[in-house]
Image: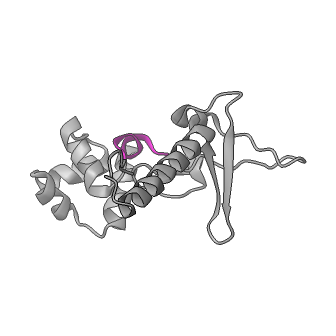
Amino acid sequence: MFRDNLVKMRKLRRLTQEDIAERLDVTRQTVAKWEAGETVPDIDRCRMLADLFGVSLDDLAKYEPEESLGLGLPPKGKHLFGVVTVGDKGQIVIPAKARKLFGIAAGDRLVVLGDEEQGLAILKEERILAFSEMVRNMKNNQEGNENGKSGEGLGTL
C-alpha cells in the first residue's frame, strides 16, 4: 500500500524520485527502494512525505483505492466514506467510520443543509446552533459599535 501510494502521489505531483530525495535529504536510490517496497522510510520522513503531498500519514501508509470507488488519496482532512443507499423514506445509514470520526451516536440530532449547485451537508445540531449564536453575537456587537458601545466579546471563526 505505502509504496503504491508513494508512487501515485509522486507522479500526480509530477515529481521525480530526485525531487523527493532532495526535499527529504536522502538519495534518489533511497526513494527508489521505498517505491520498490525494499525498505520503508522512518516515521519522520513518512510525516514529511505526507506533508509534501498534503495527505494524512495514515492515508499515505494504508489507503486502499478499491475501498473508495477507485479514487486516489484524498487531501488531508477530506474523506470519502463510500456509497450509501437511500431508503424508501429517504433514510441513509452513515458509515461507521464517519460516525466514529465525527462522534455521531444513536439519538444525535443532525441538520441537513442543501445547496442546489453544491449538494447536501449534514451537521450535528449543536454545531449549527453554536455557529448561529456566534453570528448573532457578532451582529449584536456590530450594532453596539455603531451605537458607540465597545466590541467586547467578539469571537473568532
Expressed as whole percent of the image width and height from the top left, the position of residue 109 reads: 68, 36
Q: Nearer the viewer, residue 17 or 91?
A: 91
Which is more toward the observer, 117 or 92? 117
Instruction: Judge from the rendering whether residue 26 lies leftward or rightward of residue 108; answer left or right.
Output: left
Q: Which residues are magenta?
A: 56-64
Residue 84 shown left or right of residue 98 in the figure: right
Q: Quadrant of residue 124?
A: top right
Q: Residue 57: within the magenta?
A: yes
**Quarter holding the N terminus?**
top left
- In magenta stretch: residue 97: no
Q: Residue 43, percent across and down? A: 23, 36
Res. 83 in view: yes
Query: Which residue occupies the foreground of this view, 30 or 55?
Result: 55
Residue 128 versus residue 108 in the image, above or below: below
Q: Is residue 79 left or right of residue 37?
A: right
Q: Position of residue 104 (x, y in %)?
A: 61, 33
Say which residue appears at 64% left-offset and 72% top-offset. 117
Residue furthest top as drawn: 106
Q: Residue furthest front?
A: 148
Q: Nearer the viewer, residue 101 or 117?
A: 117
Secondary structure predominantly adopted by residues drawn in magenta: helix
Query: Which residue appears at 67% of the width and 41% of the height?
Result: 110
Give the residue drawn at x 36%, y 49%: 154
